[in-house]
């Protein structure tokens, strides 16, 4: 038996599916396959697969190389390739996230004016002055105690409104004015006298020259009977700025004050404190106006 002879040989195409292949032998031989043709087809198929693998590997290599090249370009900071703007300043010129806030030179407001400066000299103490400015209204309240205001007086003859050793002291030190007001609480009456000088030094010197007999004359009237006229009364004396202020407190019934009469002492202390505050407020008001 000779293989591969006896009629036209069928052509086996390795790239066609089996359903499309021609029969092994369309002639009249015994149906034995052509082994030589099969071997040749198998070799051809293997060669094609080899070239496909080689070609695919080359394409993969090219793709990997392209990706690496792009990564290198991006890593090298080619802003045009990444689509970012190219006009940014260098990193050294960019502001740091930890940069400190700008500092400014400290500013300081001028110190407030001292009220005492305005009540220490006639040159600065120019606000209106009188019984109604020092002793306004019809009554005052100190420590929940209400005192009713009685008569007031104002004189440039300071000695005429003083008793005992005080007239001489006031005159010697240049007292220019003596303002008085009387307040009452029940049967207790207090007269406050404010002696005005041109300077703080004059007022301080006058106060230093006073003694326990240096008293302001009590002021009766406007519903207040005469008091401290020959009876023992309690007196105080003090200064602030160019002002020396005095109090005399006693009973409207004319009897003497003793150490047990605490309400007389309290009334004198209250009126002394009130007078100090009024003079100090005068200085504050003028200092505030001058600072505007």
Image (tube, rainbow, N blue to C red):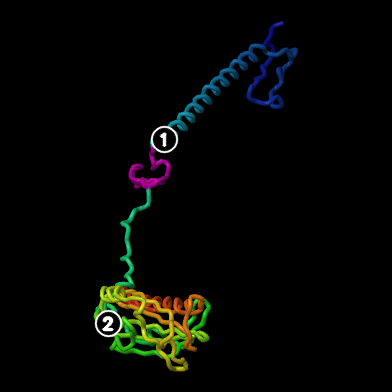
Depth check, front residue: 263 or 34: 263
User: Which residue sits furthest bottom?
Assistant: 222
**Label 1 environment density (alpha carbons within 10 Å; few <14, some 14–19, many ≥20):** few
Image height of 71 relative to 187, above or below: above
The residue tagged 2 is 168
Using residue 172 as the reference point, say whether residue 46 is left or right of it: right
Q: Look at the numbered disc 2 and give the secondary structure of its residue.
A: helix
Of callouts 1 and 2, which one flags the residue occurring earlier in the amino acid sequence? 1
Camera-side residue of 241 and 46: 241
Element type at mark 1 = helix
Looking at the rendered structure, the number of numbered marks drawn on it comes to 2
C-alpha distance separating marks 1 and 2 = 103 Å
In the rendered structure, find residue 48 and report the number of the disc placed on it: none
Mark 1, residue position: 75
Looking at the image, which is closer to me, 14 or 168? Answer: 168
Which segment did they paint magenta? 77-99
Q: Is residue 157 above or below residue 34?
A: below
Residue at 51 percent across and 82 percent down: it is 146
Q: Position of residue 83 (x, y in %)?
A: 42, 45
């Amino acid at each position: 038996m000779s293989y591969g002879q006896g009629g036209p040989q069928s052509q086996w195409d390795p790239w066609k599916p089996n359903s499309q292949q021609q029969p092994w032998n369309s002639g009249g031989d015994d149906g034995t396959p052509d082994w030589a043709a099969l071997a040749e087809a198998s070799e051809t198929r293997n060669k094609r697969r080899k070239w496909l693998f080689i070609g695919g590997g080359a394409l993969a290599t090219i793709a990997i190389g392209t990706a690496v090249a792009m990564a290198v370009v991006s890593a090298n900071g080619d802003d045009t390739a990444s689509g970012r703007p190219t006009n940014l300043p260098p990193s050294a010129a960019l502001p740091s996230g930890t940069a400190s806030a700008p500092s400014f030179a400290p500013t300081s407001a001028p110190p407030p004016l001292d009220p005492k400066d305005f009540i220490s000299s006639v040159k600065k103490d120019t606000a209106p002055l009188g019984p109604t400015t020092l002793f306004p209204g019809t009554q005052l309240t100190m420590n929940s105690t209400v005192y009713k205001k009685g008569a007031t007086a104002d004189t440039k003859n300071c000695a005429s409104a003083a008793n005992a050793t005080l007239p001489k002291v006031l005159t010697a030190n240049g007292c220019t004015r003596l303002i008085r007001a009387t307040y009452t609480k029940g049967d207790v009456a207090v007269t406050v006298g404010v002696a005005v000088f041109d300077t703080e030094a004059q007022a301080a010197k006058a106060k230093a020259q006073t003694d326990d007999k240096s008293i302001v004359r009590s002021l009766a009237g406007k519903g207040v009977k005469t008091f401290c006229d020959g009876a023992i009364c309690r007196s105080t004396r003090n200064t602030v700025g160019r002002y020396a202020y005095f109090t005399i407190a006693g009973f409207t019934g004319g009897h003497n004050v003793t150490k047990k009469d605490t309400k007389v002492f309290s009334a004198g202390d209250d009126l002394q404190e009130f007078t100090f505050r009024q003079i100090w407020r005068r200085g504050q008001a003028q200092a505030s106006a001058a600072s505007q």
